Amino acid sequence: MKYRQLGNTGMYISAVSYGGIVSAGFYGGTDYPEEGQDASDRYVSWAIDRGINYFDVAPSYGNAEKQLGNSLIPYRKRIHLACKTNKRDRASAEKELLRSMELLHTDHFDVYQLHGISSMEDVERAFGPGGVMEMMETLKPRGIADHISFTAHSEDAALRMIELYPFETVLFPFNWFMNMVHGMGNRLLKAAGERGMGILAMKAFIERRWEDGEDRGCFPKSWCKPIETDDEPEFGLAAMKYALSLGVDTLIPPGNFKSFSFAVNHIDECIGNPAYDRELLLEKLETVKGKEFF
């Protein structure tokens, strides 16, 4: 496993990170009996054995905090743990934070993130009177979080966030299709880079959004359609390499073990031979034009 410095945090993290939904046995209102605690334990052990040292989870990921927390008990001192809150008011966020710490069996987080910033209204609520930022600003002095960060799906909102506070990392969709066609993420990459922020990439493996009634097959916990790497491994490699070429520090694959393990098994190849198959991605663009991404 290759490791990269996460911005100016001083943390060196694996070039592939573990998304907590992989450990969820209940998610989106559905039980997945085959994804119980034993499965989470196996997935986490497999990841640790291959050098993964950054684990990211959120209260909104079903029972992922509970199962991942149990799986990480033997490894907590060896890994970096990131958690999130999607609450926008301080009082609710404080309760959620305490619950997360309990479920994850930890007294602190390496990274704590304001989760899912998707609009300017989210920003205004977070920074307004009684907003969640009142709590976020206390976490480092209280020893609860080493680094304060956020995740976003709106580039405009993300740019406003980093104008208002010196966040240390950002988790954002750096996706082959959205970047090639819309330039999504380019402004954020520039602004975050100028500030020395760590840059974590989600949705690098996403092909498009699921269509209504579409069979999700082996990706029931993924709310966007991942690339089917069994059928199209070269597509998966090209998408990985494209995201890495943008300058991100780590990839967090979709919430299924199949995508995660593909990324782990191929990250050395991607870093050692970073040239991506542009022609292949251009061909794939034609198949998803007009489709929704997320």
Image (spheres, grey):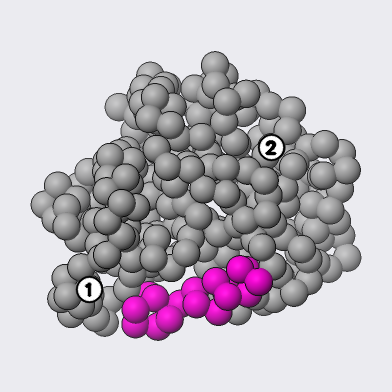
Q: Quadrant of the N terminus?
A: top left
Residue lying at 61% horizontally and 68% vertically, measured from the top left: 193
Query: Which span is picked out in magenta?
Result: 178-194
Q: Residue 98 carries which label?
A: none
Q: Earlier in the sequence, mark 2 or mark 1?
A: 2
Residue 109 in the image: state x and y as whole percent.
69, 37
Q: Residue 109 carries which label?
A: 2
Q: Is residue 178 above or below residue 240?
A: below
Q: Can residue 119 be seen in this view?
A: no
Q: Does the magenta stretch include residue 101?
A: no
Magenta region's main secondary structure? Answer: helix
Is residue 110 shown above or below 89?
A: above
Residue bearing the label numbered 1: 278
Q: Which amino acid does label 2 sit on?
A: Phe
The image quadrant that residue 33 belongs to is top left
Q: Residue at x 27, y 56 (%)?
A: 273
